[in-house]
Amino acid sequence: MALAIHQLSDADLSQWDEYVLKTPAATFFHRAGWKTVLQRAFGHQPYFLYAEREGEIVGILPLAHNKSLLFGNNLVSTPFCVYGGIVADTDEIAAALRTAACDLAQTLHVDALELRNQHRSAENWPTKSIYATFRRSIDRDPEVNMQAIPSKQRTMIRKGIKNGLVSEPGQDWERIYRIYAESVRNLGTPVFSKNYFSLLRDVFGDTVDTLMITHEGRDVAGVVSFYFRDEVLPYYGGSIAEAREIKGVNDFMYWELMRRSAEQGIQVFDFGRSKEGTGPYRFKQHWGFTPEPLHYEYYLVGADSVPDINPLNPKYQYFIRVWKKLPLPLANTVGPLLAKNLG
């Protein structure tokens, strides 16, 4: 039975997503909608490869070409996503998709092909292992989930409750964008465009939503979360500077997301990736989550070494310090021009 490799067309989107939903190794970031989002929000050319046998999809590899003078020229699975890589029914099919991706990387003359794997493959490619993901099962009973959180963080959650914090779920995209834009500026990171968040909402529908945290009627924090199968993935979260004066804001926010998700029957809380040695990494450990190393693999084409595009790279530290001092309106105007290449 012949195996053929194709590029995803709009006519095949539903068939691709049917494969994603039924295949345990696939993630939210393998969904066909990212093809639309990456192209329309950032202008990156998508190359979503799939393997077909007898009219059925038997393997997938979502890719996009991220080319920038500042941040390099790479073919990535998948930009702006924590997971990616090959999902296939057999090793033979995975090998065919990998070969097709390498051929494409050579044709595009990229620096490197990057596969954001959750698990190490059998290939002897260079890897970057500075990231870990944090995932844990949650229970329908909120008290069970509360007791699974170490005592120090439980105390912070209860301080947030005592301080009168309130959570509001929904689709409050203007509100979440204001919070997120200020939060990332304060961290020295360019903000994504409003169009990106609008596309997430339009493409993924009710599998993406927001949770706002208010204090005395004022927005102080918020998080955008993805929902996939029985999982919730808090993905874009932040708080304003004034939130530091209120004890427990971030802990309360993630607790409320966990509590509400569990009530809806969600069984897995995916806290997402963080870099080793950073504050977010330690924060998730303090919540009782165990880090699971991610294995990002690279096929080098024009580059001599693995790309090192992350805030821990010393050459970006000056830029980060300057960005933190920018007036918020200026950061929000210029930020999206830079952020589109930070995937």
Image (cartoon, rainbow, N blue to C red):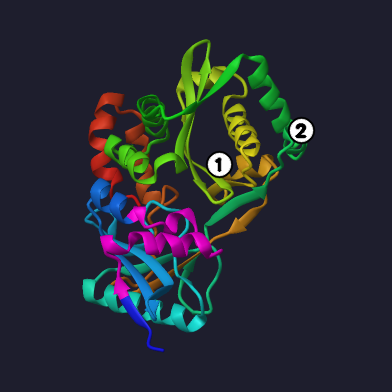
Residue range corresponding to the magenta coloring: 6-34
Upstream in sequence: badge 2 or badge 1 = 2
Does 63 sit above or below residue 271?
A: below
Which SS class for mark 2? helix
Look at discs 2 and 1 and give the one toward the viewer. Answer: 2
Tell me the kind of residue under disc 2.
Glu
The residue at the far front in this view is: 55
Q: How many marks on residues?
A: 2
Element marked by disc 1: helix
Residue 267: percent from left, percent from top: 65, 47
Which residue is pictured at 61% across the width and 30% down the height? Answer: 256
Q: Position of residue 342 (x, y in %)?
A: 33, 50
Please identify the quarter of the rendering in which residue 63 is found. bottom left
**In this figure, which residue is indicated by the disc labeled 2?**
143
Which mark is drawn over residue 280?
Answer: 1
| Farthest-out residue, bottom | 1
Between residues 209 and 270, which one lies in front from this camera angle? 209
Distance, label 2 to label 1, CA atoms, is 24 Å
Task: Give the image location of residue 288, x and y in percent.
Answer: 70, 43
